[in-house]
Image (cartoon, rainbow, N blue to C red):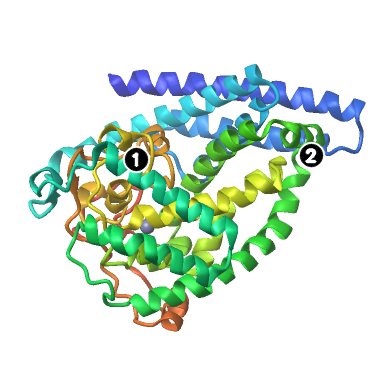
Amino acid sequence: MLNVVLVRALFALHVGEVIALLCAAFMTAAMARSHPGQGAWSATLMLLVTMLLVGWQGYRLLAGRRSLNVAGLAVQSGVVMVAIAVATQNLAAGVIGILLGCAVLAVWGRLAKTSDRRVSDSLEPSPESVYVAAAGPATQIGFSGAVLAVLTALVVLAALSVRSNIVFGLAILAVIFIPLERLFALHPLRVLRRGWRTDVVHYLVNGAALKVGLVVSVVVVGSVLRAFVPAPLRLGVAASPAWVQIVAGFAITTVGGYAAHRAAHEVPLLWRFHRVHHSVREMDWLAANHLHPLDETFGRSAAVLPLYALGFGRVSLGAFVILITVQAIFIHANVRMNFGPVRWLVATPQFHHWHHAREPQAYNTNYAGEFPLVDALFGTLYLPATRWPAQYGIDDTEPAGYLRQLAWPLRSRCAGDTEAARPNLVGDRAFEPTGKVF
Ligand SMILES: [Zn+2]
Ligand SMILES: [Zn+2]
């Protein structure tokens, strides 16, 4: 019964979205006639293509599909991102677009959840999970811990903005995170744990590779995307106040990052690269850098390219790259910090540790990098109040050493290449708890 109501509501929302996109297409077509040569025709074309894709999604819904595929996820994320950019100029139109796009995502998430209920009901939390509440006085960090975390972020940000040298950045991060992980250790872990040298190489090489990768993707993909955004919208966004750009930029980055991360789990080719990151068995601040450079470039590009295409200024672009980097390191840290209700607002170590958990009930969850709200919206949030995972990692065994890890996605098949063995599936294929982990 609930499903029938949800399907009807979702279909109505799709109709609303198609009408809104059609109206926007008429507006840009009128703009193209009055201001020829400013890219408005390409925007009209883009809006019409998006409208067709949304219509196709509505048809799939009626045909019995109950979950969002990767193409649908990309379209809906794009709708929300553009609506946020429009809101910096036209609040009423932007807010309607944001509400409509978010409502579509929320109902898709709810539908997927109701059809997956058998999974969450049948799986009890692992008895080996770590219960923070029972683990001693250092577990609830409360106000002083929150202040400490904010100060940490500020020091790191200040240090990186003063001198954005990669090696200097590593030294600063080590000075901050090594004592923090000693004070609030979640799992017993040596500072120089297994694979630390490889992870330092990941940090140093990937940092440089990311810069090159971002420049290439901005020049190649960003320029193409920019051609589809009408000049008046770009100029309007660039002219909006700095704080508006920062708030809107955060919202766009987090939606883009979510979509790319989820695609990295659902598209087999992307998973080949992303599994390098999920091979981490011991979570700490250094493990945050354990990524394949192509995977990292793909994820960051998805977060930054929309900002570039929509006309956000260089200052906000640079600030986001630094903020996302610091946040990414913090959420991997081996710290037993329980942020209470704050955990719903900002991504915390507990939130991201569950993304890496080797426990079936946490599969397909917590893709967001900054705001758990996005996962709540898409129906992929898993955030117990005080429990932490006992184990991390995937079944595939990663080779040791940076160069071997670099070549790993190209050389060997992975569990993700066979449907049944890749549990981290959303989309059209049903989730089956196979006992394997991602
Ligand atoms: Zn992941
Ligand atoms: Zn991670």
Alpha carbon distance from label 1 to label 2: 34 Å
Camera-near label (1 vs 2) is 1
Q: Quadrant of the N terminus?
A: top left
Q: Residue 425: x and y, percent?
A: 35, 51
Residue 183's disc number: none
**Residue at the (51%, 50%) spot, across then down:** 323
Q: Residues within 10 Å of mark 1 (few under 14, many from 20)?
A: many
Residue at image mark 1? 380
Is the CB atom of the residue marked by disc 2 within 8 angstroms of ligand 1's nearest atom?
no
Q: Is residue 184 left or right of residue 285?
A: left
**Residue at the (40%, 23%) spot, across then down:** 7
Q: Is residue 352 left or right of residue 411?
A: left
Q: Amino acid at mark 1?
A: Thr
- The answer to whether residue 380 is seen in the rendering is yes
Tally of numbered discs: 2
As drawn, 350 above or below 162:
above
Q: Quadrant of the C terminus?
A: bottom left
| Front residue (pair 188, 137) | 137
| Front residue (pair 127, 3) | 127
Give ligand 2's quarter of the image. bottom left
Q: Residue 269: x and y, percent?
A: 47, 64
- The answer to whether residue 366 is seen in the rendering is no
* Label 1–label 2 contact, CB within 8 A: no
Q: Amino acid at mark 2?
A: Ser
Q: Residue 167: x and y, percent?
A: 51, 72
As drawn, 326 above or below 73:
below
Which secondary structure lies at badge 1? loop
Residue at image mark 2? 42
Q: Residue 337: x and y, percent?
A: 25, 47
